[in-house]
Amino acid sequence: MSETTVDPASGKQPARNYSAFDSELTHQALNARMFVRLLGWMRPYRITVFVSIALVLIAATMSVLLPVVVGRVVIDGILLPNPVGNDLPDYGLVGLTQTLADGLSVQVLTAAGILSVIFLVIQATFSFGSRLALGSASLKALRDLRLDLFASLEHKPATFFDHVAVGRVMTRVSNDVESLVELLMGFGMLAGEFVPFFLAMFLMLHMSVEVTGVVALAIPVAAFATYFFRQAMRQTFRLIRNSVSSLNQYMQEDLAGIEVVQLSGREAMNIGEYQALNQENRRQEFRAINYEVVYDTFNTSLGSVVTAGILWYGGGEVIQSEISLGALVLFTHLVTMMIQPVAALGQQFNTLFRAMASGERIFQALDWEEQLHEPEQPFVLPDRLNGSVEFKHVHFGYYQDDPVLKDVSFRIEPGEKLAVVGPTGSGKSTIIRLLARFYDFDDGMIFLDDIDVNRIRSHDLRRRVGVVLQDFHIFSGTIRDNITLNDPNVSSERAEWAARVVNADPFIRELRDGYDTMLTERGRTLSQGQRQLLAFARVLASDPEILVLDEATANIDTATELLIQDALHKLTEGRTSIIIAHRLATISECDRILVLHHGVVEELGTHDELIDQQGIYYTLHELQFQDGAVAAELLAGKAALEEK
């Protein structure tokens, strides 16, 4: 759970320990509360779970009755009739075998074989059905859990993704959920092992307390070994989960910036770094395998030792006519049913450690208390806004005691085009992020049509503010889907109309499938200019009252920029527009220009007014349009003034 020291609705961002997103985990071997919570996702499928339990009980009963047929019916009753075993229970199987022999007109031995086959088929069929039912319920429950986790991440604010690596988040949605599948399936199979355990124990006590005591000696030994195995594996599996997260995080970062990697020739270096992470993962996995092999070998040897003890002690009992040979054979079959569940429990700890670490990480993400503040009684916006925007004494920083905007105030009238310029880091993009409410801030600072934006639900606000970012994101899908974003309010006809307005239609028509052309992730098959044209079409299709262009033409060639300038003239007509750009030629026709410097509004006015003031805007203008000597002189003069 995250740590918050400031009200999330305040202007300062809350102080959160984002490193706790991994380090807060308790790594308990068995967290009963978490396991019960996980079962909550199984509740809608409880009927399927109950069916699975019923089937496993029947299958377990059949697995115990099979050796009874061999020991009591075949050996003691048919092959080597022995009066010593007459007082031992046969659970009606001797009579059932005789009835089957009479009904089918076959020999008793043949009937016993047929009965064994029937029990075997029932056991295999019901065991298969049990696992199938449990698997179906488990997969459906974890499908719902994965969806809930994804939905939780979808609603996390921008501050969360500013501080938490995407690769670590992806590990929780993919790898960690898969580990929980193994946990639920493993516990179901473990139940199938322990039902025969108790039935076998009851049967053995009924036949011979002394021989059962020989078997019982092995149980505390197996339990003791399981305890040490659990202690050794707990830390190992925590390190394995952390190493997998590191691998995913590094791969995500590397592939996201693959072009930079290849341009800078870092392939060999990155492979080396990834190899080191992979080596650490292999080391921990191999350590776990070593523990598992030792534990499996110990359990197998323990079962053999117990069987030898039964043959030694029970053989003497047979010679002294204390028990029958069939009972001894039955004991050797039942001993496996008693040792195997204990060994399976140890094996299940393997899955349990992995799953508990994964479960903690999943529930930590679900419980991470960081949401964008939404109004309790949201203001209902009219069908169409006038489009006025006002910032009043806005003070904001992404980190405490490090403000980006300082007492920023300005107003944009409906239909007005305002350009925002300033050096890198002056806070231009921050204005856009606040207007779209990606971050929380104090009430009474930003207004839309004189309505405090904190009174508007963020979803409703963002439908009225169209933003074209410099890094336009392309989703996997068709060009049409990338324009409409599958919004039911945006028809295919409107998408094509928007593309025509922004001059994207010609290049789209030239593609093999036109608007139905499939785009790969991030639109690698399109040029930068084409992706930007799609960005314009996407915003225009949604028809927002307020248009924001954040460096939208920064990476576009001159020919494409001419097309966009024509589209912008149509797009911004009648709309309130905020245009952020370093290239001053794209904003000279704006109604007013706001100049930011170190988060402070230094200048505000028309192009001609700011040129006459000969301040920061004049300097930026001259840097772009005058020769180098004049620019250098201006920079030197500006630096001297700032020192004074």
Image (cartoon, rainbow, N blue to C red):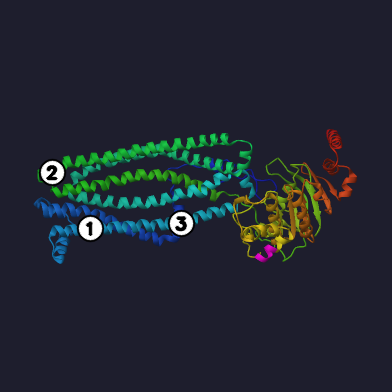
Q: Residue 494 in magenta?
A: yes
User: What x and y, as percent, mark residue 251?
Assistant: 55, 42
Under mark 3, the amino acid is Ala
Q: Which mark is residue 461?
A: none
Task: Tell whether 14 sits left or right of 124.
Answer: right
Q: State the extent of the magenta-drawn residues as a range.
A: 491-496
The secondary element bearing badge 3 is classed as helix
| Mark closest to the chain's N terminus, 2 or 3 | 3
Is residue 352 visible to the viewer in this orientation of the structure?
yes
Pointer 2 with pointer 1, Cβ within 8 A: no
Q: Badge 2: few (under 14), some or many (20 or more) residues near its Cα, within 10 Å?
A: some
- Looking at the rendered structure, which numbered label has been put on residue 317? 2
Identity of the amino acid at label 2?
Answer: Glu
- Per the model, the C-alpha gap separating discs 2 and 1 is 31 Å
**Residue assigned mark 1:** 117
Amino acid at circle 1 = Val
> What element does badge 2 sit on?
helix
Q: In the shown orientation, is residue 176 left or right of residue 630?
A: left
| Label 1: which secondary element | helix
| Label 1: how many Cα within 10 Å (few below 14, some 14–19, many 20+) | few
Q: Position of residue 55 (x, y in %)?
A: 32, 59
Residue at the image position 23 percent from the left and 48 percent from the top: 334
* Disc 3: which residue: 141
Q: Nearer the viewer, residue 147 or 272?
A: 272
Please tell me whether residue 175 belongs to the stretch shown in magenta. Answer: no
